[in-house]
Image (cartoon, coloured by chain):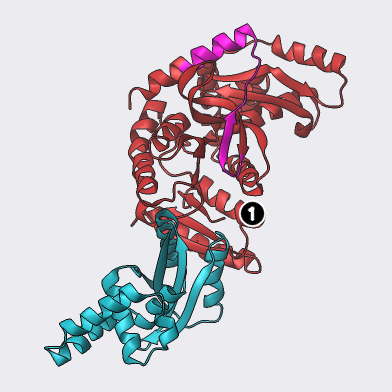
Amino acid sequence: MDVAVVGAGGDIGRQIATQLVEEGLIAAHDRLQLVEAPNSDGLNVALGLRSDLADAFGETLPQVDVGAGPDDLVADVVIFAAGATVPCDPAAVRTREDLGEANAPVFESYAAALEKDGTGGEIVIVVSNPVELGVAIFARHVERHRVIGMGSFLDTIRFRNEIARSLAVRRQRVRGLVIGEHGPHMLPLWSTVSVQGMGEELAAQKLGALMAEGEADLAAELRNAARQVAAGDIEAAYAQVDRLPVAARVALRPYVTHFTGAKTALGTAQIVVRLTRTILSGNDTLAACQMRIEGEFLGLTGTIGVPVLMSNAGIVRVEPLELTDDETARFRSSFAAVQEFLARF
Amino acid sequence: MKKRIVQLTVRNRSGILNQLTDTFAERGISLDHVLCTAVHTEPTVVLGFTAPDAVAHHLCRVLGRLPDVTSVQEIDAEAPTVRSFALVALKREGLDADLLEGFQVIAEEADRVIADCADTPRGLDARLAALEERGLLLRAIATSAAI
């Protein structure tokens, strides 16, 4: 299948393109399209990246095509990583509303182009934030089961990672999903968590202790971490994050990494590539992602992160999950917050 | 589904046919017709296939993005006038009568085209030449229609 990376000149887009090629996910006879805005610095970077990829992977490189703007976009799988992002400088505040204002027209222009010129069979993976807004806009133009927001997929991996760190096991031993918003209203589902190889009783005991750590004031903790990064004390910032409960660490650690200047391009790209591999492989996989639901989950209609069965056709169906009463209430609250945010655009 | 003819101007480099046919094979679309030729000395490949509108549009856009393809032109091979002109071109070349069998409607339209141009002997040549100028490969169209 042909894969396009929109925003290929950006930090994350560049990593995604590189890892797709490095992992051999695009066959030599397929096409990797690097798309950037016309006459932009990003387009220059994409042209350079094509040359660099040829240097690095000349033996196996698929055809690499550089496209300028929505009219050039043509692929079976579209990974959307374009648009504005949170600045690395913690002092340069950019809210979700700011990101939404900046990125809504970008989402709209590419979504409209896909509707006009696409086959209707394209799968869109939205990486850019606010991911719910991207999914909502693309789903107005592309059949909603083919629009996948990777926020909850990313949060799920990070959630497993934080549990694994706490329990001193490898991440692959931990199961568990995060749904809801990709943002402050994300919802880690402790009821879905299990740890392979630890024994049920011990796992329940240790997980119970993690759950009992409670929650943190995310906004206050973020300000603290930002201050420490700004003062150049990166280790203190990470140490502060390490002391937080699991759910708070899932939300805050990526911010600290971003503020350091290292950004989160490598981890985000790797997780996007995993999601892409799932789609390209044709295997059905249970995952969590943002999508537009129409009554399939708790009878709600809107855009939000939910558990889904995914395949090479996109989202096969929303997977029913038995949530606890507390999780159900918190999901509804997250849903309401996201829809209120989306209603502004 | 509609029969399609796509005319591609290409760079004459090794592997170009492979690039083109892979694009179709990857999507499970079988090629009915392949013609490699030159139009006004430009290396040209003409492909005939059958596909729904959306898929054909997508394929043309993908073909247009290939590094060795410089232009893509879809020709409406089912337009009666185009087909009749194609048939005229073949008739003038002494087309095998067997190939005409089963294409009576087009053949009749072709006769009408010839009749239309009868008063102006150069009219038919001019109209055929005009189509050639636009890059229409009449033989390819007619042969594809026959398939």
Question: Is A185 above or below relative to A234?
Answer: above
In this rendering, the count of numbered labels is 1
* Rendered residue at 49%/57% (across/down): A33
x and y percentages locating residue A66 in the rendered image:
45, 61
Around disc 1, counting alpha carbons within 10 Å, would you say few (fewer than 14), some (14 to 19), or many (20 or more)? some
A322 magenta-colored: yes
Left or right of B114 in this view: A141: right
Camera-nearest residue between A150 and A240 = A150
- Side of A287 where B35 appears, left or right: left
Q: Is residue A230 left or right of residue B112?
A: right
Query: In which image quadrant can residue B18 be found?
Result: bottom right
Q: Which residue is at the far top?
A: A325
* Colour of chain B in the rendered structure image: cyan
Give the chain coloured red. A
Q: Which chain carries label 1?
A: A
Q: What is the secondary structure assignment of the residue under circle 1?
A: loop
Say whether residue A318 is magenta: yes
Residue annotated with mark 1:
A25
Residue A150 at x, y percent in the picture? 55, 35
Q: Can residue B136 be seen in this view?
A: yes
Q: Could you say which is closer to the camera, residue A82 or residue B9? A: B9
Residue range of the region highlighted in magenta in the rendering: A311-335
